[in-house]
Image: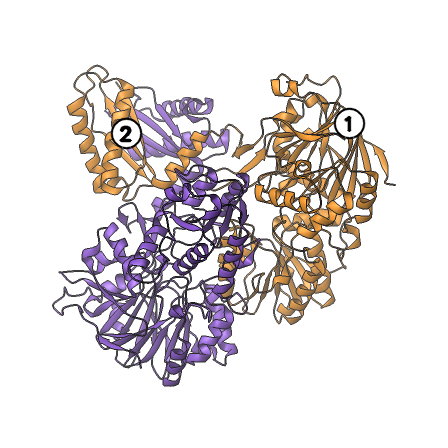
Chain colours: A purple, B orange
Amino acid sequence: MPKQRDGSDGPRTSARPAQNSAPAAGRMRSSSKTIRIVPLGGVGEVGKNATAVECGTDLLMVDAGVKFPEEEQSGIDLVIPDVSYVRERIDRMRGIMLTHGHEDHIGALPFILPQLAHDGWRVPLYGSRLTLGMVEAKLRERRALEYATFHPVEPGETITVGQIAVEFIPVAHSIPGSFMLGLHTSAGLVVFTGDFKLDVTADTLFQTDQNRLRELGDQGVLALLSDCVRIERQGRTPPETLVFEAINHLMQEAKGRVILTTFASNIPRLERAIHMAHAMGRQSAIVGRSMDQNMTVAAELGYITLPPGSVVSADEANHLPDNKVVLLTTGSQGEPTSALARIASGSHPFIQLHPGDTVVLSAEPVPGNTETVSRTIDNLFRRGAIVIYKDLNPHVHVSGHASREELRDVIRLLRPRYLAPVHGEYRHQWLYSLVAQEEGYTADKVLIAELGDVMEFSQDQAGKVGHVPAGAVLVDGLTVGNVSREVLRDRQHLAADGVVVVTLVVDRHSGELVTEPEITARGVIGGETDGFILESIDALKRMLQSKYRGKPEYGDLVARVKESVGSFIWQKTHLRPLIIPGIVEI
Amino acid sequence: MPKQRDGSDGPRTSARPAQNSAPAAGRMRSSSKTIRIVPLGGVGEVGKNATAVECGTDLLMVDAGVKFPEEEQSGIDLVIPDVSYVRERIDRMRGIMLTHGHEDHIGALPFILPQLAHDGWRVPLYGSRLTLGMVEAKLRERRALEYATFHPVEPGETITVGQIAVEFIPVAHSIPGSFMLGLHTSAGLVVFTGDFKLDVTADTLFQTDQNRLRELGDQGVLALLSDCVRIERQGRTPPETLVFEAINHLMQEAKGRVILTTFASNIPRLERAIHMAHAMGRQSAIVGRSMDQNMTVAAELGYITLPPGSVVSADEANHLPDNKVVLLTTGSQGEPTSALARIASGSHPFIQLHPGDTVVLSAEPVPGNTETVSRTIDNLFRRGAIVIYKDLNPHVHVSGHASREELRDVIRLLRPRYLAPVHGEYRHQWLYSLVAQEEGYTADKVLIAELGDVMEFSQDQAGKVGHVPAGAVLVDGLTVGNVSREVLRDRQHLAADGVVVVTLVVDRHSGELVTEPEITARGVIGGETDGFILESIDALKRMLQSKYRGKPEYGDLVARVKESVGSFIWQKTHLRPLIIPGIVEI
């Protein structure tokens, strides 16, 4: 029987009245016999996971992650979920349940907490000590600590918020302190898998509690909201022990230093590497701010234990013989400013690569990073390193996500009445629905939701009952949201062909040019001193003389200048720079 | 014994004297006992393959391909090799040998032929009829036909240009009419593999002639310049028959239409698909301009034979029952304007997806296209198609390139004195050198060249003897080359944060503002009507009033305007748009 504890710090009922006037919201009144689930992120996309869950008068969120911008989102720093659905129901909001500490599950908190906290009410955050430790560091950095309260939960513990009992079921994932969530409500039990795998060889502390899943299945599960991102992979994700063995072997073979790169949050793998190095008489140094920070938090919170003297500073490591050193570095995605990318390019301030160093990339590139990772590998080879990566040795990394058969196992353990694949792109959701059908579910039992779809589950039925605003909020510098399509379109236009600024001073009465037009070109081939740019001024002057005898209308003048200069440049170069006329009437 | 024929159309010796004054070129005098090879593309990168080969007084090029721009090459259309090394030796230039018709081997011809042809001398092009057919279409489109002469060669044929006999050895690749080249010179025999695989199950017409390779090995090979791009893959590339069987099976299973997508140049696979469809009573339609064009050229030149009535127009296919139709489409890389991407998004002018259509992606995304391909697959599933792709069924596509053991096989067949891996990134070259070492070669027998390295081979020695200008020439609209780093940097800056134009009219004597400053913002959040932009004008005016009593110096004024507006915007938004002052003195 899991531990039980009361939640606290729920919002005071005197909170600011919610802006609950949207007609869609009015139509969809919540009952205690139904549970309503709205994906605000993570479905039809990978990243910015966030879900609203509502039952009776209680609403909670699961996760609040970020996504990195797509190529056409020029200049955008981060993409976060739109939480206006939650903000409009803020009087019912009981808190945010965090499944684990990865960026795509917690990264939006610094931006959305200020949108949700109000009148002294802070948003209660529930999660493992490690997750909350990582969130705390993040909020401190972004000056958003004041918007949250922290409620650490232990594996297996159940906390109650409003009328909902939330059970935190431990799961194996690539970061410790990861949970599946069991939401025990008056409408029934809903299980959110979060990110997980069924790696029976994982450290017992971090194993997925399959017995508890079976118990829950026996008690009856209303709905399973399952990760599905790795459903394209047949079979089961290989065990983490495979990676440990591969790293151990490579460390034993290495004659020089070993430089091991993995995700900065893969704390168990880093811990194990330090232990293995220690056993071989090597000392380890951590190089890279995020990895250092994560390991410090994990050690402080008791998630890892390291042999005394097993970790040294990078400076100390530089004074040890090469065969006594392991460097643990960031940069597994080839990020240009990461430790590994700098070591590879020879620009790291205090780590130089030695010929004969063995570099192990214990990771695989996420889509979009293939080329930066390849550049890093090329550079490492160029400097004489022995480089081992997944294409050469598939055992140096395994995923933290369940493959197809594990996803099927969870369906069999829980035997839910309804299923809804989340945390995946559309094809993953679709393929998951096919697996569910193989398991005997009819198509109507599997809901494929897109962002903002309102799913409603009760013992009798399940379906999509509405749609609410949800989607991408773009963060650009200090600005959150408010980035229009037009701004992005202009940026892409500027990126493609540059900009030409034409400055004209015209007499406000006669419309005649007072001085020569000035022209400035940036991002345009040849620049403003090139012949065609200068010629375009002559063309412009001819146009102005022929068409603008008498006072021109201002907007018309702007359009004519754009047309004249733009079409001249197109003719000469087949480029379409953005033309900005700066016209002053005096 | 291979067929022999004399080349013709060599440059007249009365040609314009070559600009042969570069000191590097002077130092490196070519002898008939050495052969000099300069990679102008394709090494340390994938794409824009081009190599200069020089022996005695003869120079030739192998291939002239394009590469697609990298992300930081904003707005660039294509990247082509720098052929100034060849241009400076144009009096020795005997022609361009084309291994096959892929873009990364022929795509630069429309741009470089005009750089090489002169005084009525046209550049002789040698290659298979199919390759030349594709080149001709390309040159016609770009109005560059007048710069070339065409010299088709048959499989196994040897042509002589100057003192070099060039043997065209047939190889299996993913396009017909592909050749390995044997350059028989007074210095020895050099073999260029081009792109190939050793697929013994391929149509006999297109098999790699391993017997001939063994004969050449027996005669003695000086140097092997080998493809290495797929050396990370262990074993051998699976046979094309695997793909035929998979497609055949999927066609048989399909209850509705079959939509098959592959590379537009994979003519044998398309031909086979049409035959298989025909055998099942299905008619095929080709949808997509490039695929249609390639199949037309291949049929005209006799590379393929199709059963009468097996191919219909897309319009005719639209009037057939679904189970009688196969559509062959472009879009295997998810290109947004391709037939498949449009069908997937519902925007194709005359093909609508029917629920139950089976879509087979007989390809895999090249790095950089993963996300566009995923979007296409998601959209196809959304519209109810059954989608089969390589992640789900690995047999729907095999590569056209040799894997590690095939590359080793060629080393064993040819037993060259020296080796140089080409057509690969640095890590591929490096891994190839390790395979060569496993085959008993010492490291000094394997040259790893970077772009522009001059490799020299003779019976006694091999080495890198110099370096010449080589690299990327950027094509942007009508402009070839002449794209400075500054232009690209400005474009990236514009893409990230947009542009703010500040127009000032100042009195040329007093330096006082004649009118209010005007400000225009594009690609900037909020645009020019936003508060912070208007406030920045006030800050600017205060700055001008306090610092510019008396006539300011123009350059100083420009700098101060940039600084004032830029730092104001940074403070308010943490964005750094490009600030362009348009200052007119009257």
Chain bearing mark 1: B
Residue B339, given in percent of the width and then of the height, sits at 56, 54
Residue A488, given in percent of the width and then of the height, sits at 37, 45
Residue found 31% across the figure and 25% down from its top: A504
Secondary structure of residue under mark 2: helix
Residue A228 circle label = none
Residue B107 occupies which quadrant of the picture?
top right
Q: Nearer the viewer, mark 2 or mark 1?
A: 2
In the rendered view, tell whether residue A163 sits above or below residue A291: below
Tell me the quadrant of the picture where the C terminus of chain B can be found: top left
Residue A45 occupies which quadrant of the picture?
bottom left
Residue B156 occupies which quadrant of the picture?
top right
Same chain shared by disc 2 and disc 1: yes
Chain bearing mark 2: B
**B23 sits to left or right of B126:** left
Residue found 28% across the figure and 54% down from its top: A138
The residue where tag 2 is placed is B562
Tell me the quadrant of the picture where the N terminus of chain B can be found: top right
Check the image and name the residue furthest to the left. Answer: A14
**B496 sits to left or right of B558:** right
Q: Which residue is at the front of the view, A235 or B343?
A: A235
Does residue B390 appear in the picture of this structure? yes
**B409 sits to left or right of B49:** right
The residue where tag 1 is placed is B9
Amino acid on which the number 2 mark rests in the picture: Lys
